[in-house]
Image (cartoon, rainbow, N blue to C red):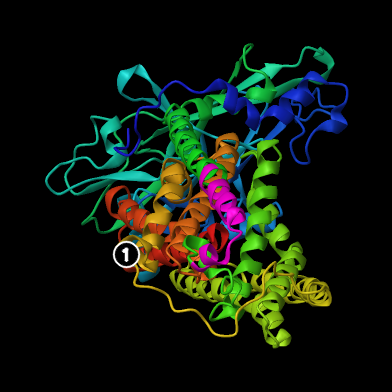
C-alpha cells in the first residue's frame, strides 16, 4: 500500500450515521420516495432483456479528475492520453464542483448488469518516441506516475474503491487508484509498486492498464424493482498484452523503461464480475469507505479537550462576573461620603473614556460587518451539513451552499458595519458601505484570481473557466453588493447605540502597564485557548483538502464550531476585564484582535502541516498551497474576531 495510508481504527458508528441519516430515513419510508434528497434517489438495475421504465440494464462508469498527494494541481481525465468516450455528453456540474476543480466525464467503460466480462479490450494507444507529440504524451504519463496521480472513477454516484490490507489486519479502502508506479534507479519500489514482486526492473515505470472490477448489488425485497448497487471495488493490474486485439490478461507486467525509445504500445483492458451482497442496504452503502477512514476515535478526545477548556473559561468568567464585579459594584454603592469617592480605583476610573471612539473605527466596523457575514454563513452551512444535506454523495453541495449563503448574507454585513460605524461617530457613510462591500471580498477574490492564473498556466482542471468567474462576479456585484447597501441603509437610519455614560472631553492618561496588560502579550495569549479547541479538527480538515480524504464528521465539526464561538467570546471577556482594571480603555481593537489572533496560530499550523505531513513538490504547488491558505486565514481571522 502507499506509504501515506495509516491503519484505520474502529469507526464511530453513531456519528457516521449522521451522514446518511436522511437516506436511511428515506429507506425506512420506502414508499415515500419523494422524501429523498435531490440527486440521492436510488437507481434500480435489472438484467438485459428485462428492462422496465424504472429499471435499466446499462451501467455507466464516469471518471473524475486525477489528483495527487504530491501536487496541488489536479488534471482532468482528457488531459492524459487514456481511452476516451466518443461523443457522450458530460454530466452538468454545480458551482461547488467547479470551484473544487471536479470534472466528471463519461468513460469508454460500459457494463451490462449481471453480465460477466473477462479481459475485454477498451483501446490500444501507440507511442512513437521519435515523434515530438507522442513523446510529450508519454512523458506526461511518466511524470504523473512519478507523482503518484490517482484515478477517481464513479459508478452510480459511488466511488469505485481499491481496498487493500494494511498492518493490524485492517482493510483500507482508497476511493482512487494510481495510474502506475515507478521503480527507482537503485531498484527501490515507489508508492504502489510494492504490491507486486514482478515489478523489479530498475528505472522503469509500470502502468496499471487492466482493472478487475467487482460490482456488489443488493436485490430489493420487492422483487419487481430489480437490484441496487451497494459497492464497486477494483484491483489495478499491469499486463503486457502480446496480442492487443485478442488480449488474454496474463503474462509479464506492462513496463515502460525510462530510457525507452522506438514504439511503445499500451493496451487497456478490463474484467467485470457481479456479486450479490445481502447484508449491505442501499442507504448504508458508503459505510465501508468511511469505516476505513483513519482516526475517528481521536475525535472524542478532541471534543473532551475542548470542553475542558470551555468549562475552565466559563468558570473564570462566571467568577469574575459574579464575585469580583459584584464586590466592585457593592463597594461603589457604599460610597456616600465625598472623600471616599475621590479614591476611585480599577475599571471605575475609566468610565468617562470607555466609549471613546477607537482609532481607525472605519476599518473596525468593516471587519465586524464581514465577520458577521462569515459567522452566519458558517453556522447555517454546518447546520445543514449536520442534517445530512451536504453528504459526500451530494457532490459539491457544501461549497455551493457556502457561496450562495455568503452572497445572500450581504444585508447583515451592511447593517452591522453601519450600526458600529455610526456609534463610533463616523460621518463618511458612503465610504463605509463601499468598503464593507468590496474590501474583504476583494482581497479574497484577488488572491483567488492570482491562484487561478497559475492553475490556468499549468493547464490544471482546478482552473475555473472564464464563464464561472464572470458568474461569481455577477453574484457578488448584482446580489451581494445591493443587499449590503440595503443593510447599511437600515443600519444608518436607526439611532446610534446609546452609551450609558458620557465620554469626557479630555482623554485620560493611561498609566504605565505591566508586561501582561500591554496590548501585544494580551493578544498573543488570547489566541492560544480558541486554537487549542480546534487544532485536532483542523488536522482532519486540512487532510480532506490536501490529502484528498473524505470529510464527513460534520456532527463533530458543528460541536467544535459552537465550542470555538464560546471560547473566543469568553477569552476576550476575561482579557478585556483585566486590562480595564489596569486602566487601559482602548478595548475595541484589542477585543477584536485577541480572538482574531487564533488565525495567526492557524497559519503557523498550516505551515507546520505543509512541511511535516505533505510531500508537495514543485513551485506552482507550493505557491498554490500558501495562496489558498491565506484565503482561509483571512476568513478565519474575520470570523473569530
For residue 324: magenta?
yes
Across the whole image, how many numbered discs are drawn on residues? 1
> Nearest the camera: 33 or 509?
509
Q: Residue 386 is drawn in which quadrant?
A: top right
Q: Is residue 318 above or below residue 437?
A: above
> Pointer 1: what residue?
514
Q: Which quadrant of the figure contains the C terminus?
A: bottom right
User: Picture coordinates of residue 333 (x, y %)?
Assistant: 62, 54
Residues 254 and 214: in front is 214
Q: Is residue 422 magenta?
A: no
- Residue 468: give x, y in percent of width and height: 66, 68
> Which residue is painted at 75% across and 31% down in the image?
43
Range covered by the magenta-colored residues:
323-342
Looking at the picture, does residue 351 appear above or below residue 386?
below
Left/right placement of residue 64 relative to residue 130 reads right
When the figure is inspected, residue 572 is found, relative to residue 411, above or below; the finding is above
Side of 158 relative to 2 (left or right) = right
The answer, for residue 401, to whether it is visible in the render is: yes
By secondary structure, the bulk of the magenta-drawn segment is best described as helix
Looking at the image, residue 318 sits to the left or right of residue 399; the answer is: left
Q: Secondary structure at mark 1?
A: loop
Amino acid at each position: 500500500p502507499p506509504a501515506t495510508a495509516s491503519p484505520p481504527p474502529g469507526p464511530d458508528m453513531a456519528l457516521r450515521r449522521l451522514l446518511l441519516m436522511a437516506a436511511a430515513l428515506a429507506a425506512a419510508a420506502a414508499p415515500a420516495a419523494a422524501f429523498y434528497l435531490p440527486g440521492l434517489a436510488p437507481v434500480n438495475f435489472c438484467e438485459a432483456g428485462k428492462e422496465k421504465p424504472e429499471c435499466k440494464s446499462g451501467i455507466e462508469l464516469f471518471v473524475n479528475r486525477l489528483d495527487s498527494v504530491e501536487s496541488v494541481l489536479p488534471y482532468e481525465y482528457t488531459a492524459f492520453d487514456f481511452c476516451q468516450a466518443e461523443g457522450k455528453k458530460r454530466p452538468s456540474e454545480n458551482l461547488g464542483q467547479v470551484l473544487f476543480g471536479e470534472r466528471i466525464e463519461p468513460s469508454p467503460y460500459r457494463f451490462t448488469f449481471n453480465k460477466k466480462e473477462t479481459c475485454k479490450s477498451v483501446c490500444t494507444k501507440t507511442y512513437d518516441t521519435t515523434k515530438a507529440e507522442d513523446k510529450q504524451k508519454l512523458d506526461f504519463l511518466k511524470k504523473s506516475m512519478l507523482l503518484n496521480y490517482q484515478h477517481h472513477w464513479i459508478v452510480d454516484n459511488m466511488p469505485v474503491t481499491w481496498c487493500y490490507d494494511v498492518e493490524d489486519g485492517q482493510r483500507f479502502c482508497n476511493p482512487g487508484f494510481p495510474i502506475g508506479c515507478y521503480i527507482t534507479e537503485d531498484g527501490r519500489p515507489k508508492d504502489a509498486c510494492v504490491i507486486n514482486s514482478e515489478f523489479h526492473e530498475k528505472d522503469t515505470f509500470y502502468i496499471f492498464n487492466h482493472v478487475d472490477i467487482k460490482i456488489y448489488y443488493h436485490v430489493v425485497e420487492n422483487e419487481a424493482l430489480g437490484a441496487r448497487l451497494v459497492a464497486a471495488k477494483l484491483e489495478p493490474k499491469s499486463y503486457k498484452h502480446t496480442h492487443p486485439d485478442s488480449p488474454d490478461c496474463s503474462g509479464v507486467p506492462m513496463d515502460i523503461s525510462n530510457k525507452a525509445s522506438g514504439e511503445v504500445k499500451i493496451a487497456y483492458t478490463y474484467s467485470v464480475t457481479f456479486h450479490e451482497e445481502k447484508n449491505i442496504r442501499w442507504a448504508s452503502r458508503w459505510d465501508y469507505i468511511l469505516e476505513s477512514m483513519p482516526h475517528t476515535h481521536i475525535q472524542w478526545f478532541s471534543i473532551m479537550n475542548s470542553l475542558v477548556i470551555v468549562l475552565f473559561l466559563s468558570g473564570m468568567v462566571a467568577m469574575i462576573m459574579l464575585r469580583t464585579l459584584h464586590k466592585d459594584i457593592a463597594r461603589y454603592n457604599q460610597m456616600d461620603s465625598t472623600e471616599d469617592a475621590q479614591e476611585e480605583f480599577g475599571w471605575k476610573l475609566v468610565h468617562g473614556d470607555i466609549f471613546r471612539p477607537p482609532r481607525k473605527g472605519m476599518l473596525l466596523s468593516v471587519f465586524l460587518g464581514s465577520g458577521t457575514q462569515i459567522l452566519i454563513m458558517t453556522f447555517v452551512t454546518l447546520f445543514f451539513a449536520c442534517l445530512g444535506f451536504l453528504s459526500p454523495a451530494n457532490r459539491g453541495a457544501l461549497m455551493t451552499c457556502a457561496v450562495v449563503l455568503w452572497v445572500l448574507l450581504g444585508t447583515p454585513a451592511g447593517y452591522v458595519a453601519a450600526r458600529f460605524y455610526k456609534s463610533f461617530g463616523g460621518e463618511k457613510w458612503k465610504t463605509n458601505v463601499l468598503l464593507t462591500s468590496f474590501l474583504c471580498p476583494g482581497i479574497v477574490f484577488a488572491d483567488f484570481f492570482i491562484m487561478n492564473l497559475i492553475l490556468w498556466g499549468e493547464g490544471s482542471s482546478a482552473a475555473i473557466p472564464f464563464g464561472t468567474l464572470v458568474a461569481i462576479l455577477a453574484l457578488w456585484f448584482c446580489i451581494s453588493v445591493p443587499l449590503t447597501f440595503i443593510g447599511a441603509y437600515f443600519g444608518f437610519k436607526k439611532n446610534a447605540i446609546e452609551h450609558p455614560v458620557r465620554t469626557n472631553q479630555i482623554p485620560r492618561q493611561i498609566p504605565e502597564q505591566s508586561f501582561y496588560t500591554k496590548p501585544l502579550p494580551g493578544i498573543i495569549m488570547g489566541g492560544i485557548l480558541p486554537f487549542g479547541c480546534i487544532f485536532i479538527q483542523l488536522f482532519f480538515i486540512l487532510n480532506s483538502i490536501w490529502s484528498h480524504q473524505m470529510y464527513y464528521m460534520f456532527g463533530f465539526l458543528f460541536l467544535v464550531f459552537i465550542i470555538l464561538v464560546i471560547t473566543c467570546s469568553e477569552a476576550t471577556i476575561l482579557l478585556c476585564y483585566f486590562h480595564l482594571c489596569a486602566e487601559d480603555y482602548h478595548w475595541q481593537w484589542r477585543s477584536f484582535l485577541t480572538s482574531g489572533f487564533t488565525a495567526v496560530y492557524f497559519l503557523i499550523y498550516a505551515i507546520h502541516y505543509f512541511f511535516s505531513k505533505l510531500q508537495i513538490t514543485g513551485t506552482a504547488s507550493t505557491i498554490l498551497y500558501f495562496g489558498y491558505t491565506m484565503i482561509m486565514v483571512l476568513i478565519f481571522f474575520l470570523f473569530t474576531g
